[in-house]
Image (cartoon, grey):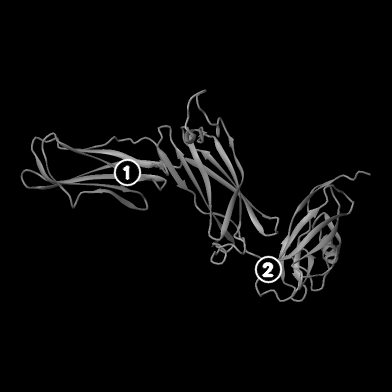
Amino acid sequence: MLKLPQSFGVIYLGEAFCTYISVSNTSSEPVTNIVIKAELQTDRQKVTLKDGTKTPLPSLGPGEREDFIVSHDVKEVGPHTLVCSTSYTAPDGEQKYVPQYFKFASHNPFSVRTKSRTVAAETGAPQVLMEACVENATKGTLFLEYVRFDAGTGLSATRVAPPTAVGQSAGRHRSPAGAAVSSYVAGLQLLDPGGAVNTLYRVQRLGPGTAEHAAAQVTIVGGNSTALGRLEIKWRGMLGDMGRLQTQQITAPVLLAKDVELVMTAVEKEVQAEVPFNITLAVRRSNDASSTVNSGQYTVVCGPSSAPGETLAEGAAREQRDGQGNVVVLSQTPDVVDLSEAAEASVQVTLLPLRTGVQHLPLLRLQDVQRHVTFDAVESTVMVHPCAS
């Protein structure tokens, strides 16, 4: 007879499933050549926890038992079946096989939500700000040891700010007043059911000159997304049992190094309706730009498409005639920038807002003068206030 409780309680992804199994002879006669096996089955795989095929028990007398412990890190959410079986030789020489099945389900201990946004770094290179919210989805309190983001190949990640807790008492360190608490225990975050912790990371490509840059290749998912990396979460339960899990790959728009890029570097703080204002754009050539850049002259054009030779103001006028946008481009200085020798040049664009409120600026594209190829684009919004006069 195999003895196990029919209910294992609640088991969570990332924790270690550990159970004590007792095999006992409840008959009045001894049995011989006992082979004990324990397997854990899921929808995807079957894992052998114990296999006594090569080392069978010689005999098991009446009332005797064989006890053992098996454990396995739970890596899947959903139904699990623990299959425990014994085969033995009865006193009359007959071979017998006795299987027993114990079912349980594993649940996700955390609800993880992420948001990402691609922005320009101080150097002008694209980077992603990735926010992660980790919420305790269990019915008990968890001691959060850490939330760590492991950047993907060719990327580096830096935590922007320390985590801030949301919820009943999430993120607070509880300890009795005056009690001597070790630094490890004191550093654990207490996360009550429904409590959450938020982290923010800056993710960007490894820069030229780093030891990893030459061999690093950013992983592209689905042709238009970068695999940023994975979150790793480590925690302990109320009885000190440890759990650890990793999320699936977190993706964001492709972070490819651009040969030439267009970046908005300055905009007036106070923008008023029907009053012209200026924005400053930087046209930058990458330090490790490839040889595909044949022309050193570029211009800024307006809208998703433009006719060859069309100036920024002409494109903006066409966009306005088509009824697109509430911000009109008046002019740009200079009309053409040359990066044949300089690695960076500035362009000042004068715009006229027609309405108040949050307004989208016209789509500004950086285009090669000779080939009319678009290298980069800038989209942004401004808050337009009523005219003071």
Q: Report the side of 88 relative to 250 (left or right).
A: left
Point out the residue furthest to the left here: 92
Q: Disc 2 or 1, which lies upstream in sequence? A: 1
Quadrant where the N terminus is found in the figure: top left
The image shows residue 145, relative to residue 365, as above or below, that is above
| Numbered badge on residue 259 | 2
Amino acid on which the number 2 mark rests in the picture: Asp
Contact, CB < 8 Å: mark 2 with mark 1? no
Give the image quarter of residue 132: top right
Front-lying residue, 226 or 305: 226
* Residue at 56%, 39% in the rendered image: 197
Front-lying residue, 139 or 235: 235
Q: Report the side of 366 relative to 218 (left or right).
A: right
| Numbered badge on residue 271 | none
* Residue at 35%, 53% in the rendered image: 45
* Residue at 48%, 29% in the rendered image: 181
| Numbered badge on residue 71 | 1
Q: Position of residue 238 (x, y in %)?
A: 43, 32
Quadrant where the C terminus is found in the figure: top right
Q: Report the side of 35 relative to 274 (left or right).
A: left
Q: Residues within 10 Å of mark 1 (few under 14, many from 20)?
A: few
Give the image quarter of residue 34: top left
